[in-house]
Amino acid sequence: MSDHLLSVRDLSVSFDTRKGLVEAVRGVSFNLGREKLGIVGESGSGKSQTGRALLRLTPPPGRVTASTMTFDGIDLLAASDRQLRDLRGGRISMVMQDPKYSLNPVMTVGRQISEAYRAHAKASKAVAKAKSLEMLEAVRIRDPERVYRAYPHEVSGGMGQRIMIAMMLITDPDLLIADEPTSALDVTVQLQVLAILDDLVTTRGLGLIFISHDLNLVASFCDRILVMYGGQVMEELAAAELHQAQHPYTKGLLNCLPQIDARHAALPVLTRDPAWLL
Amino acid sequence: MIDIQDLNVTFSTGADLVHAVKNVSCRITAGESFGLVGESGSGKSTVLRALCGLATDWSGRVSIDGEALEPTARRSDSFYKTVQMVFQDPYGSLHPRHTVNRILSEPIAIQGLDKPGPRVEEALEQVGLGHGFRFRFPHQLSGGQRQRVAIARALILKPKILLLDEPTSALDVSVQAEVLNLLMRLREELSLTFVLVSHDLAVVSHICDRIAVMRNGEVVEEVTADELARGEPGQRYTRQLLVASRGYDREAIDQFEDFG
């Protein structure tokens, strides 16, 4: 067990609503080493709530339970607020979907990145600036000085997301949770951003949890995949073996995608079986 | 059916002038399914908006079903009986406080047609929603069901042409498959002409026979879906889009060019 960076057993997230108890995540278990793990599912499958629960970011009426949820020996469920504050953004970082909403619109990019660094490391402003510029260069931003002074609305979506990645990796975390980090981007930009993320994750030896609705993308990007549906893990498999998937849900998701090189008159439609959720 | 010659569309805000569509020409015959594909900002949606009268600052010659269009003149009632549009976001395009019945009855009332009841029932039937949905509000429907309502609203005037602006990109893939199947079936049954705009090469090549690839307001090339299936588009830009649509490939990404 101790060789895993992250270990999760029977994670459940539930919300008390007017219509009764909604179980967003139901008994999810997985281990993560220094590898790229993909969590795939459609909307409402609980993939994002799983990612948030790991950082104890589940919004208030939500309740998180698990028999084990440890990160590098630290029990995340028992951690104090102070411990969590050090972990969040320090050793575990999270990249959200849309840079338009996750960057502060009235603060320059540089100030935001430096702030993230200084929140976790005792460093002077000058050191933080040097470190930020270095990080902007690492995410392949051509003119770091200019971008450092720019406001978020002055950069493109792809650059915004690279800035987010720079901000999240500047504290040298051990684990990065990326929730649909590239879904708002054009395909080619999306792949270029992923390539940067891939290189950084590989050279720094990070663990990565990549949450996405795009099965093909996750399969080609990650080492291992969890397929989620209705808050449960339907299937766990190595990315390379996706095409030998056993579970009807995984197969259904794969088949209902239109193919460029094999045109069909009608796409197979996914039929959901209530028995999957028993 | 649709004839576009040298279409140019501009947007001006203050001193800035954005040339969103540059010299686009294409001819779409009746019953054909034509696709416009491109990345964000390529002008693909703007072409559709100029066709249906939502973008008025354009020049060039456009005629639909024999009727020549003017940029700013109000379109005739018969135009809207010929051409209808389906928008991307089924959450934003349906009035949240109108029932499905009221949403679908509105085009009938505007056109002054008789028998609204049976027409609404028929349109719901066509898109595979039973009459149980007729008096529901949009918030009581899933994303896929909302998009079916939006398609029903477009079909209720029995148009010849459907303009589809990213009709499935807000939907989950399994729901996308259902909506794509529905669109294919309707095109067959009602002999519709489609103009589909999407950023997703796989979706466009599934629905359309002929595809115009756009970048920076210009048409880069026109390809057939079969040429795409064989993986042999003429332009490097299209080939790059094709490679990108296949998923993550670390080596291929280093070869990507910046087409600006």
Image: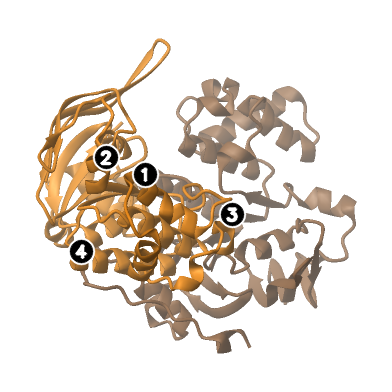
Chain colours: A brown, B orange
- In primary-sequence order, the first of circles 2 and 4 is 2
In the rendered image, the vertical position of residue B237 relative to residue B172, given as above or below: above
- The quadrant in which the C terminus of chain A is found is bottom right
| Residue B12 coordinates in the image, percent (x, y) | 37, 18
Check the residue under mark 3 and report the chain it is in.
A
Which residue in the protein does label 4 denote? B190
- In primary-sequence order, the first of circles 2 and 1 is 2
Res. A241 visible in picture = no
| Residue A48 coordinates in the image, percent (x, y) | 63, 61
Residue type, label 4: Leu
Tag in front: 3 or 4: 4
Q: Are marks 4 and 1 on the same chain?
A: yes
Residue type, label 2: Asp
Q: Is residue B240 left or right of residue A187?
A: left
Q: Distance of mark 3 from mark 2, alpha carbons?
A: 50 Å
Q: Are marks 2 and 1 on the same chain?
A: yes
Tag in front: 4 or 1: 1
Q: Distance of mark 2 from mark 4, alpha carbons?
A: 21 Å
Which residue in the protein does label 1 denote? B110
Which residue in the protein does label 3 denote? A178
Which structural element holds mark 1? Answer: helix
Residue at image location 49% in from the left, 59% down from the top: B100
